[in-house]
Each structure stands twice: as structure tokens, then as C-alpha cells.
Image: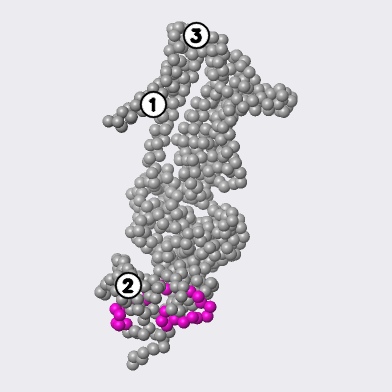
Amino acid sequence: MKQKLVSSLLIILGAVFIAVMLIVPLCTVLAYALRQGWETFASAIRDPYAIKALRLTLLAAVVTVALNTVFGVFSSWAISKFRFKGRQFLTTLIDIPFAISPVIAGLVFVLVFGRIGWAYSFLQAHHLKVVFAVPGIILATIFVTLPFVSRELIPLMQAQGNEEEEAAALMGAGGFKIYRKITLPHIKWGLLYGIILCTARAMGEFGAVSVVSGHLRGKTNTLPLHIEILFNEFHLTAAFAVSSILVVIAIMILILRNIVEYKGKKAGSEDVR
Amino acid sequence: MYVKLEHIYKNFGGFRASDDVSFSIEKGKLTGLLGPSGSGKTTILRMIAGLEQPDAGDIIIDGVRVNDLPASQRGIGFVFQNYALFRYMTVFDNIAFGLEVQKKDKKFIKERVQELIRLIGLEGMEKRYPHQLSGGQKQRVAFARALAPNPHLLLLDEPFAAIDAKVRKELRSWLRETINKVGITSIFVTHDQDEAIEVADEIIITHQGRVEQKGSPAAIYKNPTTPFAAQFIGQSLILDDYTKLHGFDKTGTYTQAVIRPEFIQLARPGKHLYQNAAEDGIVEDVFFRGNSLEVRVNVKGMRLVAHCSLEEEAFQPDDPVSVLIYRLFLYNHDQVQLVENRMLEDKNPVFI
């Protein structure tokens, strides 16, 4: 009897916590966005600046995910399948973006490429603009989302071991064939999962991007930055309307994530040795 | 000599895995590298395959120094301890992999794979994946996969370690027969002396990165030439003070002795033919070993192990027993000598 009381109490506590922390805020976003009717909502998300911000966000996410996927696959392959000096150091290095505040990440790029940065004269000479421009935003996003793919892949690849690859190499298979036929089938679900997480993070990145963007409307504003501006200008409905775009994308990504996780688990349970 | 290792050294960090390893193997022979874990036997195998590089020394296969030849060009088939089958490929694709890498034509690959599948007796399982196979079947597929590209030399790393006891026995004789049928020079690694003795034409005993002894199973069993070989082979027990036993005197610098169950004969007190050569002991324990009894006896504070036939009346714990020791291996830190019981030699009864 007492045990039952405790367990139901804990369940209620958990439910209340989730409701207050997650469900209510999300619902508020949608409710607030639609508060002044569909017309206001539609005009807010049809606003040319909002659309430009969405485009920039998607562009940054696509470039970031592509580069980080390539980097993640290569680095995790190197770390899990080879023994070399500095391997441990490289593993730690990859984790740095998780440990450092995004604002610092943004400042680093300003200090390197900005007006006071040491690369500024070089960039100026070649008519390149990094800070307060799209390349800076992409760089900052790459930095912040760097570990996602490799963090997913390293444990998977380590669990797989080297023997299958050694067996293939002994029979004369080249690196690319080994990767395609042996490594990739093993990591594909983990890779997809890492890519999805990386995408979600890249779209929502605020801190680092905020520092390097310069908030030029229609030029260097991403969706999260656009929302902040709207909010600061007391366009609350518009701010929440645009937020709802991000929320919808996030929910879609989460659904995708669950499908991938489910498929990956199914594939995983099939190759129990 | 087909495979030859000359003064091979290999260190992993501070660990010396190979310490002046030299040996050679004849063409067509099945050789077992036998040693306890950590004795460097797998390292030797991996260096021959080209999966590790020796720090110093030469590896020669068929008259060619292969140290600088990449693994894939040495013409070697390798069977990994856990088989390392490609888990996302079918049995057929696993066996065909090496041939596909060599860009052989489809028809040839198909015929060769079918031929190998017949050889390993897995007809009808071509479309299965590794996780749908039993341990013994996986082992056979790994074997076929290694043989597919027609290697000159087959290396097997602990080929039976991951298989349950019953299947292991069958697989041992199967592997031996199949290797003989194919006629390929083979080296396998094992820590199990029964396996080495049963399967190998020749055994190389390794210990602490060195080669202790090389010879036929019978020769190694009967005439161990190093103290380690004497202790490692057979069901050997070490005696610290062998001079306490009847008929064995202090000999040279030999301080310790190795005794095996087959050196001992047990009888009821007073029933031994050579009564004066026998010791009195007490039975401590009796274990049923399936085809015989293992009897532990205490003789002058030393615990000895002997085997008894099931035909005889069984000893019980605390029974007094007469223990006759025929011979011992005496050893010091670098020599071994077989000595017979002096009392048996002296009183050589004349039966004419």
C-alpha cells in the first residue's frame, strides 16, 4: 500500500515536471503564435526577412552537416581503427566544442577573422569577408556541432573491432572497398542518427552565431537570431510564429530520429552473434 | 624450408612479444605453435601474415624475404580467432570476397565458391548470414574464405577456441583431414596441448616470446629439452624435493623434478612386484574422469596425481596405497634429464 503510494507519487511528480518544463512551453509557443488569428501568423512567416532567415539557416545547416559528416567519419575511423601517437589527444580535442560555451566559440572567430584579428589583413587583401557574413555563421555552426557525428560513430566502430577489416585487407581489398563493404554497413544507422542530431543542433544554434553574425537583417540573420530581434522589438506574435517554424522542424527531426533509432535497433538485434 | 623466421624481435611498448625467434617449417606440414597466453605465439602468426612488423629479423616464405611485402601480396590465408566473418555478407559473398577483389570473372568465382562450400559440407547454406550459423559452421566458412584465393600458406589463430567441447573434437579431425586433402602448408596457434598433439605434424613450443622446443608431438612429449617444455606438456606436477623418493638420488645440479600421472603406478599395499622400490602413501581424493579414475595420493607430504583403470577395485579416500614411481624429469634452470627409478634398474630380475 505504502509502496503503491510512493510509486504513484513519483509518477505524478515526473508527469508534472515534464508538463511544466516541456509540454506547456511548447504549447505556449504555438498558442501565442496563433493568438491573433491565422492571418497574423501567416503574414509573420511570409515576411521576406523571415524567409531569408530560414534560407540562411537551412544553408548553414546543410553545409555544416555535410562537412561535419565527412570529418566525423574520417576522424572516427582514424581514432577507432588505428593506433597512433596523439590519438587520445585528438579524441579530447573533438569533444572541446561540447565543453566550451558557444559564445566563446563565436568570439574566437571574431578574434581570428574580425577587424582586430590576425587574419584580417590577409582576408582584406583577398576581398574575403568572414565575420559578419555567411562564412562566419557557417564556421561558427561547424565548430559547435563538430562532435555529433564522430561521438556516435567511435563507440560503434570500436565495438566492431578490426578483425573483419584486417581479413579484407589480407585478401587485398583497398581502403575504399573495405569501408564500403565492411565498415559502412555496420555504422550506417549510427551515422544517420549522428547526422540528424547534428542537423537539429545546427538549425537551433544561437550563441556562437549571434556573436559572428552582426544581425544584418536579410543578410546574416538566421532564424533563431530573427526571432530574438522580433522579440526585442515587442513583435511577440510574430516572434512566436517564426519560433513555431523551428518547433515544427524540430518535431519532424525528432520523429525521424525515432524512426532511425528503431530501425537501427532492429538491425542491431539481427546481428547478435 | 618453406617458411623461415630468422632472429625475429618484436616489442609492444615495454612488452617483449618476440625474443630472438627463429624456426623453419617444411612445405606441406601442419605446424602448431603451442604456448600459454602471452607467450607470443599469436604475434608470430601475425608477423608472418604481415599484420604486424617485426622490429628486427627476417621472415622468408618460399625463398623470398617478405618483410617489406604488404600482407595482401604474401599469398597467405588467415583464419581469425573469432572468424571475423563479414557479418553483412552471406556465406557465398564471404567466400567470394577474396576472388572478387582479384577481379576474377563471375563464372569462375561461382564455381570456386561452390567447390569450397562442398568441401566444407555446407551445401544449401550459401544465402545465410554469419549470425544464422553455429560456431562450427562459422569456423568452416572462415576456413573456406581463407582458402578461396588459393593461398600458399594457411595461418589459423586459435581455430578451435570459440567452439564447444564436443564440436571441437569433430572439427579438429575434420580440419586435419581437409588440410591434408588440400595439401596446403599450415600453421596454427593454440594454448591447448591436446589440440596441438592431436592435430599438428610438428609442434613449436613458445614461452615468454622465445621458442622453447620444436619437434614432432611424440618427441616433445617423450623428450622435453627445456624445463618449461617438461612442465608445460602432459599433466605435469612439480616436485621440489625429489630426493625424498625411493630410488631417486640427487643428480648433478638438478634441483627440481617434473612428474606425470603415467610415471606412477598405484597398487594395494604389498601387491607391488617391486615392493622395495615403492612408496607408502595415503589416498586423498578420487575423481571420476570418464575413461579412468584420477587418484590424488600423499607421499611423504608430496601430493601426486595418478591414473587408475576403471576395471580395478576403486580406491577410497584415506586408503593406504603403494606408489611405484618409474621415472622423473629432473631439471634445473636450463636443462632437463629423464631418470629412471634406480631401485628398478639395480634389482633387474632375470626372467629366463
Label 1 resides on the chain identified as A
> In the picture, which quadrant includes the C terminus of chain B?
bottom left
Q: Is residue A184 visible?
A: no
Where does residue B257 sit, x and y in percent of width and height?
46, 74
Between marks 3 and 2 in the image, the one whose residue lies nearer the viewer? 2
State the residue at coordinates (58%, 23%). Answer: A207
Crowding around mark 2 (Cα neighbors within 10 Å: few <14, some 14 to 19, many 20+) is many
Q: Residue at horizontal 44%, vertical 74%?
A: B222
Front residue of A191 and A215: A215
Q: Mark 1 and mark 3: span between their CA atoms?
A: 38 Å
Q: Real-space Cα distance between discs 3 and 2?
A: 99 Å
Q: Which residue is mark 3?
A: A43
**Residue A57 location, quadrant:** top right
Q: Which residue is mark 1?
A: A14
Q: CA distance from mark 1 to mark 2?
A: 67 Å
Decide which of tag 1 and tag 3 comes sooner along the chain: 1
The mark lying in front, picked from 1 and 3, is 1
Badge 2 is on which residue? Answer: B283
> At 30% across and 82% down in the image, what residue appears?
B270
Please say whether residue A191 is visible from this viewpoint.
Answer: yes
What amino acid type is highlighted by mark number 3?
Answer: Ser
